[in-house]
Amino acid sequence: MRGFRGRYGGAIACLFVFTVINYITPLVASATIDFALAEKPNDDVLTSLIINLMGGGDYVKGHLWFPAFLMVCLTLCSGFFSYGKDRLAAQASDGLARKLKDRLFNHLQRLPVEYHDRAETGDLIQRCTSDVETLRLALSSQVVAVSNSLLLLLTALPIMVVLDGRMALASFVLIGPIIFFGYFYTKKVKHLFLEVDEAEGQVTRVVQENITGLRVVRAFAQQDFEIEKFAESNRDYRDRSLRLLKLMAWYWSTSDIFVLLQQGFVLFVGVTFIANGSLTVGTLFAFLMFLNMLLWPVRQMGRTLTELGKSLVALTRIGEILQVEEEQPPQDPVKPGRPAKGGLTVKDLCFSYGDGAVLNGFSFQIAPGETLAIVGPSGAGKSTIMSLLLKFYGYDAGSIQIDGMELSGLDTEWVRSQFSVVMQEPFLYSKTIGENIRLSQHSAVDEEVSAAARLADIHETISGFTSGYATLVGERGVTLSGGQRQRVALARAMLQKTPFLLLDDALSAVDADTENRILEALRSRHGKRTTLVIAHRLSTLAHADQIIVMDGGRIVQHGTHDDLVNEDGLYRRLWQIQNDLENEIPLTD
């Protein structure tokens, strides 16, 4: 709440003035009824004080319009301060919600990749939106409501005791049971809020997964299955919400009975005292108005405590994200003041996901400007190498050095700024093609963007679109073909002038002719960037300075394309299989 305490303080101050005015108004009516209309003796402190403040007894009797006018003015002032407390509380809560959303989003950007591997996207969205909104509503209304209830209790009790101690006692007979009932209800309902929140999160997850994987669902004709899965989650959310609503209805109806009993009891006692002459009509009128003002917030206390309980559940879920440690930089990280030259040395590298070892004693060395290709069966650990180079994960043992500097001791942001990357599944934003390419270099001019697109052999395709580089692509680039997405992602990487280029199976979706043109463009830039290429299509690797063949997290072969083709081993077998397939089935985009 730092930065918003002043506004909350202002809201509480407005609430205090609002409460005082609300208690003065019934006293004005009570004094006028008893003294001016019923002509009862002016023998109590409050009545005497109010009559004197209105100009004295004779003035009030001769100007009965004045008390009515004063009550109207007090009501208007009460409305003004009520508006002030609501406005200030809303400004504070909205500002706090914005601050919290910014903090959550910034925190998510800095969390380790391992956390995002485990976390569910739909649940994260739920916590960053719905849970924050729950907290905002609680801060805008419930904090003020609690203060209002406490102020009313603390202010009402002494005033009512001064007016008439017997009536004050009668007015509080059922207040205790109402408060206890609200507390009991809060304890019962708190766990239901958590269940409803989790059920809503499940609905969000199902919707998010279905929309993201819409093409897969359609391809396998699984619409009915997905509809039933959503209906099941929705039913569960509905059932939990109904249980919550039933409990709330039970509370409200029961508390209504308590409230009506309390008002009826006060009215009965008051009429009895009036009948025997020990109470005035004006005093009973004041008590009934005080009781009406007092019972509502007390009755609301159960709901207030419930909403606060719900907000505590939301705060706990938000806190679970904020308590996750951010990606930790190395102690005293080295941040070179220059770009890397491009040298890369990996020695005895070991890494495992959980209990499963992925890399075992992995070693290689690349000179600046060279191209290293990595090939091997699925699950051999090829993409893991890219993740380790980008410091998505920390390696268990061994060494990775860039220009002789240990990777684990280098500044993370500096390391990632040295690599241009084309992922195995390229991600495009729902923006224009030009904006997607400029993602790596926002200040790039049109000529630089088109030059990068030519290197990726996508310029002619983009120019053929009606809007050219201003063509909007759908979410995740679904309006482009797989090969087009890969080439746009390659253009994005080529635009970024970095010492290292990482291509993780980046040409798997393009046809052979397009692949040859792209490879020719890359060969023309040989020596300018250190390049690591991961591919299953061995024709992509033929131009590499050296090729590593992986199997089971180890290097089983190492050499040039010509060396490995002439050497008995896994590479030669893969080469022969692919050649036979290409001769039988021509590759198309």
Image (cartoon, rainbow, N blue to C red):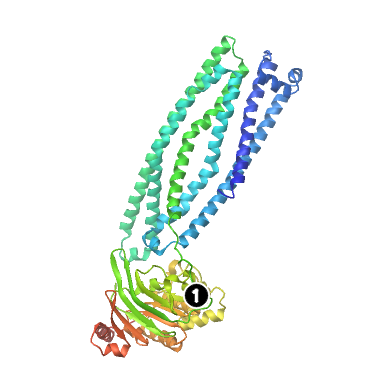
Examine the rendering and report whether any part of residue 509 can be seen. Answer: no
Residue at 38% in and 58% down: 120
Q: Is residue 376 above or below residue 98?
A: below
Q: Amino acid at mark 1?
A: Ile
Find residue 283 and report its horizontal and vertical position in percent: 61, 18
Residue at 33% in and 78% down: 363
Find residue 45 and report its horizontal and vertical position in percent: 67, 19
Q: Is residue 410 above or below residue 460?
A: above
Residue situated furthest front in the rendering: 332
**Helix, strand or loop for disc 1:** helix
Residue at 42% in and 81% down: 531
**Label 1 environment density (alpha carbons within 10 Å; few <14, some 14–19, many ≥20):** many
Find residue 535 and report its horizontal and vertical position in percent: 34, 79
Q: Is residue 546 above or below residue 121?
A: below
User: In front: 101, or 560?
Assistant: 560
Q: Is residue 107 above or below residue 425?
A: above
- Circle count: 1
Q: Is residue 249 left or right of residue 53?
A: left
User: In front: 447, or 368?
Assistant: 368
Residue bearing the label numbered 1: 437
